[in-house]
Image (tube, rainbow, N blue to C red):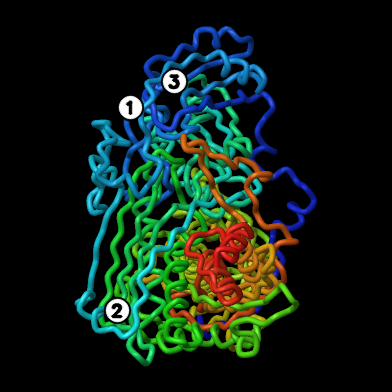
Amino acid sequence: MENMKRKYVGQPIVKKDARSLLSGQPVYTDDIAPDNALKVKLKRSPHAFARIKNIDTSKAMLVPGIEIIITYKDVPQNRFTLAGQTFPEPSPYDRLILDEYVRFVGDPVAIIAGKDEACCMKAMRLIKVEYEVLEPILDFKKSLDNPILIHPEDNYVGHDGQGTDQKRNLCASSDSVEGDVEGVLASCDYIVDEHYHIKAVSQAMMEPFTAFTSMDYYGRIKVESATQIPFHVRRIVAHALNISKSQVRVVKPRIGGGFGAKQTAVCEIYPAIVTYLTHKPAHLTFTREECFINGSPRHEMEVHIRIGADKTGKFKAVDLYTLSNTGAYGEHGPTTVGLSGTKSLSMYYGFEAHRFAYDVVYTNRLSAGAYRGYGATQGIFALESAVNELAHKMNMDPTMLREMNMVHEGNKFTHYYGETAESCALDRCVAKVKEMIDWDKKYPCYSVGPNKVRAVGMAMAMQGSGISNCDVGTVQLRLNDDGFYTLMVGCSDMGTGCDTILAQMAADCMGCDLDKIVVYGVDTDQSPYDSGSYASSTTYVTGMAVVKTCEIMKNKIMNAASEILGIGKENLFFDGERVFAVEDENTGISLADLVTKLQAGRGEVLFAQASHTSPVSPPPFMAGAAEVEIDLETGKITPIDYVACVDCGTVVNANLAKVQTEGGLVQGMGMALYEDVLYTDKGDLMNRNFMQYKIPSRLDMGQIRVEFEESYEPSGPFGAKSIGEVVINTPAPAIAEAVYNGTGLRFRTMPITAEKVFMGLNKK
């Protein structure tokens, strides 16, 4: 592949669906749901923890237009998880569609379906619920071994190898160590020993959670949903309803943003059970408030780090412990936390000893889930902040400390499944970022007025490319009349442009024009199996499936042409449009004629399929540097410039890669400076709309500049790795460091607001 001729890979190709999206074509779930579908609404718990003693729906059922009201008494009693993960799921089975116990404010109590929203809302007010209010656990630091049990049920199912213990409120636990950590730390000349608190934040995608369900002619449930995980939704809905997967079909329209939120099947089960019980179509779309109070935000984590170095700055030992808050249910709890260690510690090389341990606990807060970065974001904020603090203790430039200790190509990773860095341009990324930000001139800060200062800070990051030995990508390729191809994929394009990228790869593999590749989206009845669009897997994993499938197709084309032309395959050449004799180019056959002869003469269609899973997950790397302006009178922080350099292997599409990077950086800035999930002392979410939950606008982000330093990943398609998640991980530690360099205030909890800076400066 390294020597394969490239016409489209590496080019800034416009997304295949750009015209339809920009022209407002009806492509989203809400666009295609019929008006006559039953409208579904959810009555929710006002309590953080309670048991339903009695629920009376009799008056609500008298409301004209109401079709059905479902309570915990009406649903199957087999527990399941909503996490979109490859089977067998590591997340515990701790949910029911509706439960006698409600475990957070907003937990659904009843499902109401009627002809319109008005009658559903009226019926909701008439449902009378008597609760036994229980004492909640709202502080995740007090959950472990608390006598209050979040999940007292007997049919709770924890999975082997996750360290689950429901009697301790423990969703997952692990401890791994290599070397004498305590002994080596004791010998270090410099040590940083600090706690870093990373709060929950919301994905805030444009399109809310939404799903439409109907019953087909064969009595099967059809789910049309804005989901990142169509095949997992099929399994989850079947499990929740206690029916066979063969009775569920999932179709994915276009997705208006996901960022991991839609890797959890947040809403699909509710219209599905309405359709299952009534045999009528049902449609549920969360309000923006519901997306906040019943979404799947990033896991809150506290990370305790001890890291030590010798007098020269060489790292010797590190000890990282993460306490993670999974909330009321365990979706993604056992898996996100692992990345807080594996994706942070492995950026550095040469530790004599290292330890990584974690506990994931239940609380009576909103259940957490997947968010871009998936645990790595929390761990990287903590470790990169600690590295910056260590550099200041040593009176050393933090970039020099990183250059001394960072992983290089050919190194074995510190804590990354025994893998070796076969492709790594992290050193070049750091050098490029220093050049872009003019580090040597601006570090640590400089004055721009009597009360204003500008300061810079830097951080590094890595992620993964799919989940090794787990994620599966499959594609099918069919040669049609006129010689064009249908590329059928099972992965979800959620605005990232993966349909375009996979088409670019297929076009180069087949040697044809890009418009000869027609990409067909996800329908679990027709599409090949794919784990889904998460874990930065699509370009790397599904891309390799494209390469394999194209090789099979080319071989079939050559075999068919050899039979028709009566010439040995070894004496033929395929240029993407024709197969012809090597010695006589005039002797040959076009793809269009080949298809005609195969279909008319033999009734044969050329079809190829291949799957790919990888034994490794090669990390993309990046470096980022922030320049901020701080008003020393008011504490206001203004982003001035953010520069980033990314190693994602071969850049398949520069336009899409740049947009991915810019979007991730802005989300990281939001986490660092603006976004904050706040609760009352009763566990009620306070900020439940965009007036109360601040996300950065174009006015809040300053200048963003992105460059790429390519490496070549031998296990990836055309040398490519992932890019989707790594790009969110550097802003928080880089901005925190810049604020320290400008004010002397060290913030170990996000977000860093003007109020916190103002109070810190006045106290100082």
- Please identify, in this view, whether the residue under mark 1 or under mark 3 is nearer the observer: 3
Q: Is residue 346 above or below residue 125?
A: below
Q: Kindly identify the residue that appears in the image at 52 percent across and 55 percent down.
A: 491
- Residue 250 in percent (x, y) is at 51, 41
> Badge 2 local density, few (<14 within 10 Å), some, or many (20+)?
many
Q: Kindly identify the residue that appears in the image at 72 percent across and 68 percent down.
A: 702
Determine the image quadrant of residue 454. Answer: bottom right
Is residue 172 visible from the viewing direction of this image?
yes
Q: Kindly identify the residue that appears in the image at 59 percent across and 89 percent down.
A: 583
Q: Residue extending furthest right? A: 23
Question: Distance between the Cα atoms at labels 1 and 3?
Answer: 12 Å
Q: Residue extending furthest bottom? A: 312
> Badge 3 local density, few (<14 within 10 Å), some, or many (20+)?
some
Amino acid type of the residue tagged 1 in the rendering: Gln
Q: Earlier in the sequence, mark 3 or mark 2?
A: 3
Q: Kindly identify the residue that appears in the image at 31 percent across and 47 percent down.
A: 171
According to the picture, the residue beneath numbered tag 1 turns out to be: 77
Question: Distance between the Cα atoms at labels 1 and 2?
Answer: 48 Å
Query: SS for tag 2?
Result: strand
